[in-house]
Image (spheres, helix red, strand yellow):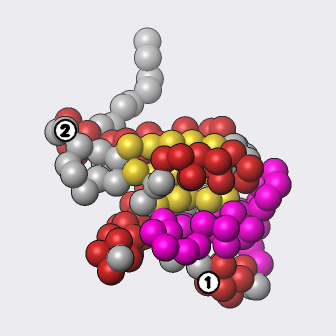
Amino acid sequence: MCKRVWSVSLASLAPPGPDAGRVLVVDDSEDMVQLLAMWLRDEGCTVFTALSGHDALAIARSCRPDVVFLDLFLPPPDGLSVCESLQGEGAPGVILMTGVPNPDVPRRAAEAGAVALLQKPFTREDALSAFSTAIARSHDAHARH
């Protein structure tokens, strides 16, 4: 007997809207990448994934995401370096994620250009709230250029 319960967002039953967004999810934990990717696909997003900073930069150049969920601690370069590299014209909204509490991280994340910082473990609601903030900022930036 299967004891799994599957939940499906009603948004996932409708075709993606034009404003759903392209999202890059980067974490060295494949489980975290898959979980976030599932949540975002349920909301109608097109999701790209990477497991290292190097791959994140290469994929970001080719797919030009609107939003990037980016782990702070990655195989080189780290999340802060990737975040700084992504800044510039048409930059995506970057959401940094960390599982290590450090009082210096919020300041460093803001200096690197992140629009939000998620402390692991976080809920689906936390992730989608951060996504909403980042996509709004990304759309505002694109409208100005």
Q: Could you say where residue 104 lies in the image, as x and y percent from the top left?
A: 76, 85
Name which residue lies at 56% across and 52% down: 60
Q: Is residue 17 visible?
A: yes
Q: Is residue 125 magenta?
A: no
Is disc 2 placed on a helix, strand or loop? Answer: loop
Residue 136: quadrant of the picture: bottom left
Name which residue lies at 54% across and 67% down: 95
| 101 relative position to 13: left or right | right
Is disc 1 placed on a helix, strand or loop? Answer: helix
> Which three-letter amino acid code belongs to the residue tagged 1?
Ala
Residue under label 2: 15
Q: Pick the residue in front: 43 or 101.
A: 43
Q: Could you say where residue 14 lies in the image, as x and y percent from the top left?
A: 17, 39
| 116 relative position to 58: left or right | left
Name which residue lies at 55% across and 74% down: 88
Residue 110 - label: 1
The quarter of the rendered structure image containing the N terminus is top left
Binning the other alpha carbons within 10 Å of mark 2 as few (below 14), some (14 to 19) or many (20 upward) gives few
Q: Is residue 72 visible?
A: no
> Which three-letter amino acid code belongs to the residue tagged 2?
Pro
Label 1 to label 2, Cα distance in Å?
Answer: 34 Å
Q: Pick the residue in front: 41 or 144.
A: 144
| 65 relative position to 31: left or right | left
